[in-house]
Amino acid sequence: MAMSLPFLDPDDYSTSSHQLRTAPTPDPAINTAPDAFDKFEGSGATRTQVGGLRNTRADAAHGEESAAQRQHQRQQSEKEATQALLKQPTPYLYTRLRTLAYGGKTRECRELAEYIIKDRREKPSAQLYSALILSNTSHDNGGAWRVLEYLEEMREAGLQPDTGTCHAVLKVLAVHPDHLLRADILEYMRIRWYQLGEEGTHDVAAGLLREGLFEQAMQRIDGMLRAGVRVQAWLLDMAVYMLCAAGEVEESYRIMRQRYDTGELNISRTLWYTLLDTGSSRRHYASTALVWNGQVNTSYLNPASGVCLNVLTTAAQAGDAVLATDVFTHLSKRGTSFTPIHYQLLIDCYLAADPPDLKRALSILTIMALEKMADPSPAETRSLYLHLRSNPLLVAEAFTTLRDLRAEERKVPIAALNLIIECYVEQRNLTEAMNVYKLIHTFVPTSQAATGKRTFANIETFNLLLRGCRLADPPDEALASFLVSELLALRVVPTALTYDRLILVFVQAGAHALEKVSQTPPDSEEAQVQRKKGLELLDWAFRHFVDMQAVSDIATHTNSATADDHTALGWMPRFGTVERLALQLAKVGDGRCWDVLQAGEDHGAKGGLDLAWDRKGGWVRKNVEEAWSGDVGGNGAVAEGLEVPDVGVASA
């Protein structure tokens, strides 16, 4: 029965030069002798001694003579080994051929096979071709295309592959994948009722892994396990490495978990490290915890700091506080300098636990203060803010926890108190936010209290409270003015956001007062009072707008020599604040709306206001013009000569 494998066209290759029946006489010097240079290396001479001979011309000449002698000795040894091999009986040559094939000696195996055919008058056989095929397991010199050539030669010689030949092909395909050839060989074995052995099953699975057919490969491996076949460690290692490289962490973890549970010894530490690196980088908690608890905690592995950070992130997402603490302990023994990101992840870990541990999460902020770090920024408190925002009833509990920590002589940073204020502002509970502000002085560290410092509120504190003044119903401009006076008294330097929110408070308060005018009889005393109040508040808003520009002008002139383009633009409110101020002034017929509009357009033309003016500036002007035309002829222009006390932040 002829074999029906889809062989390549023999005309595509120069197979005639490879035919065993017509092969030329091989070079008698078959490379089977031991390397003479290796003998020289073992004779007692050291590399230092040999290198020292090159320092003089005489030594160089001696070195050339030694090299020539070594070359002569090598050739002589090869000749003697070849002659000794050719004197061996034919069965020995077949054994030698098989040995060369297992070693991947493609050229030597081919030469010996040609010698057996030509000089020993042996007929081509499946045994010979099996050895030739098997020799292509060499990574450098082998190839699936050579296997196809040998199979074609067998077909021309009337030889059918036996089970040994088929297994040799599968072993080569485990190194040089060829999906079509593998499928043909397996189908051929099925038709011939050839049993696929354990070694062949391993080779098939390895070839599938190399081709990226992970699902089929794992089906083969699982089938072996179900059949009670012991899967070799090298195949499992290969599977884990390749699955990790492909991002299939869950399947890699399943394999390693099974090997770990069965008590398999001598699993490569490099393999464990690969699983830890890949699992933690992909936030796979199960694999990360397995490697850390089984290998790192037992001091078998010492992962890099970057891997430790990934493990900490994975523990934070899973809420495993024990694992996160272990990572901190490991890094502490190494002497790592912790950064805010480490503590932020530890906070996330406590909040993600079941149930969340709010007290421990807040205590991390005090630990950061003990480590002499810079005060935590709002970025380090975002996870706490989100947690408290989703559980409003916990805000009071969080503040009580901070007071308890202060009673334990823990240093509570201002960022923790600002967090409580921010949560109350988000709830539009300005009263409780101010109560927290009034108690800030009780949290002043003892070292600072000894110097007479009354509070350590910062600009972030005042910016949050000003936002609370704007969100209050109605907007509380009186409290905003008090906060400005507090800010000046404490010598806290305002920022552009401070001015921006102050302007918004007065714009919103003025708009609220003017809305009441439309809800009362036009000629009533209350309507007049509310209208006057609204106009005064809008005048305040414009004055703060001018103050903001004045501060920026001073900064620009002071630093004109070193200021960059952004600084030269000066401070301006945010785009929405400018729009709202101009619209409210236009609605009451205040001509200063055009000054605000022009300032915004000039600033936008220079690249300020986040370039929003290029996209929306035209709409703002149109809205201001419509508001102006709707007011003129209606309620009239703004009252002139208003006496407003001069309170602002320009002096800051």
Image: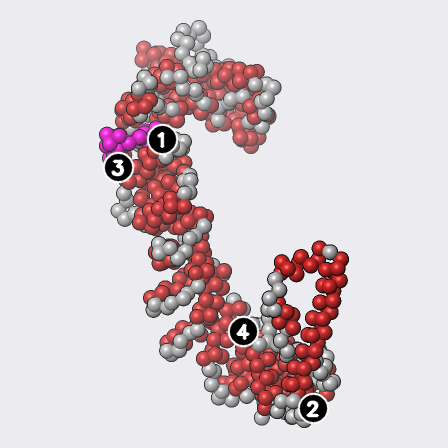
Q: Amino acid at mark 1?
A: Ala
> Secondary structure under badge 4?
loop
Magenta segment:
397-426
- Give the secondary structure at mark 2: loop
Q: Residue 202, can we see it?
A: yes
Q: Nearer the viewer, mark 4 or mark 2?
A: 2
Q: Nearer the viewer, mark 4 or mark 3?
A: 4
3D distance between C-alphas at marks 2 and 3: 94 Å
Determine whether 450 is above or below 36 in the image: above
Q: Residue at x 26, y 47 (%)?
A: 355
Q: Amino acid at mark 2?
A: Asp
| Model colouring | secondary structure
Residue under numbered circle 1: 415
Look at mark 4 in the image and give the residue it sits on: 174
Check disc 3 and report the residue beneath it: 394
Q: Which mark is residue 208?
A: none
Tell me: residue 532, above or below residue 455.
above
Q: Quick one: 473 or 429, which is closer to the camera?
A: 429
